[in-house]
Image: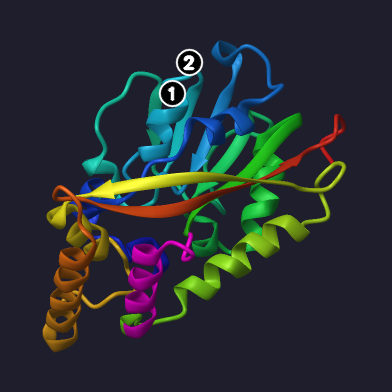
Amino acid sequence: MSFTERFTGRADAYVAGRPSYPDAAIDVLLANLGDPRDVVVADLGAGTGISSRLLAARGVQVLAVEPNAAMRDAAEPCDGVEWVDGTAEATGLHEASVDLAAAFQAFHWFDARKALDEIVRIVRPGGRAAVVYNERDESDEFTGAYGALVRTFATDATERRRADGLSAFAAFEGWHGGPRRTEIRNVQRLDRDGLHSRVRSTSYLPQAGAASESLRADIDALFDRHAREGRIAMVLTTIVVCGDLGADGA
């Protein structure tokens, strides 16, 4: 299965189970880009539009680039968001047409070099690129136990890919003055169904068969041990890495 098709059939779970991003992360992305009403953002690998809606709420114009039709179809309509059937490597956007190109929880699915070349092509001189990830803070007891279950049942090395994607973005030689990294605390609160939706939205966890049934039982047991008033709190670190393009586009 291609990376662009991994989430077909998981869009509803993605809507129900994936965390949002803190306001402070959006602040970092838009800092010093000017009046938000004049800012155009390409949201690369936009999924079901979680990040696109947050950006549009600031008044910017968002071009939500997403190759998976099921994910696009699951997105809530939102003023200020225009959906684009494209990939990070071939967005279909015009040269120097956006002020910011950002990928939320998605850069590891891209061909890093081709995506970076496309970002340089579509971002205006003096503009910005960024990757944003929610990663588990496993110093928290529940979150650490959840992470241990993920590693036990993982069907591939996606978690390693995420770390490699962050490194590839930060190491790109085209960032004027080098990359800038910001970390922000984030908490996702979920009821039992929401936690199961989070699991179902994860492409590298089993979705059927004996392994899936065992995972579901372990998730139920974990929820029962840690829930307070019918909810758990998953503690996350939102990582934002920004790279600016020089006034000459390099």
Give the amino acid type for the residue marked by disc 1 in the picture.
Answer: Ala
Report x, y in % for residue 11.
Answer: 23, 52
In the picture, the quarter occupied by the C terminus is top right
Q: Name the residue under label 2.
A: 59
Q: Residue 56 carries which label?
A: 1
Report x, y in % for residue 97.
Answer: 63, 28
In magenta segment, residue 144: yes
- Separation of marks 1 and 2 at Cα, in angstroms: 5 Å
Name the side, left or right, on which 36 lies relative to 87.
Answer: right
Report x, y in % for residue 9.
Answer: 19, 61
Mark 2 residue element: loop
Q: Quadrant of residue 148?
A: bottom left
Figure check: 201 above or below 37: below
Give the amino acid type for the residue marked by disc 2 in the picture.
Answer: Gly
Residue 17 appears anywhere in the view:
yes
Mark 1 residue element: helix
> Which residues are the magenta region?
137-152
In the picture, the quarter occupied by the N terminus is bottom left
Name the side, left or right, on which 168 lies relative to 187.
Answer: right
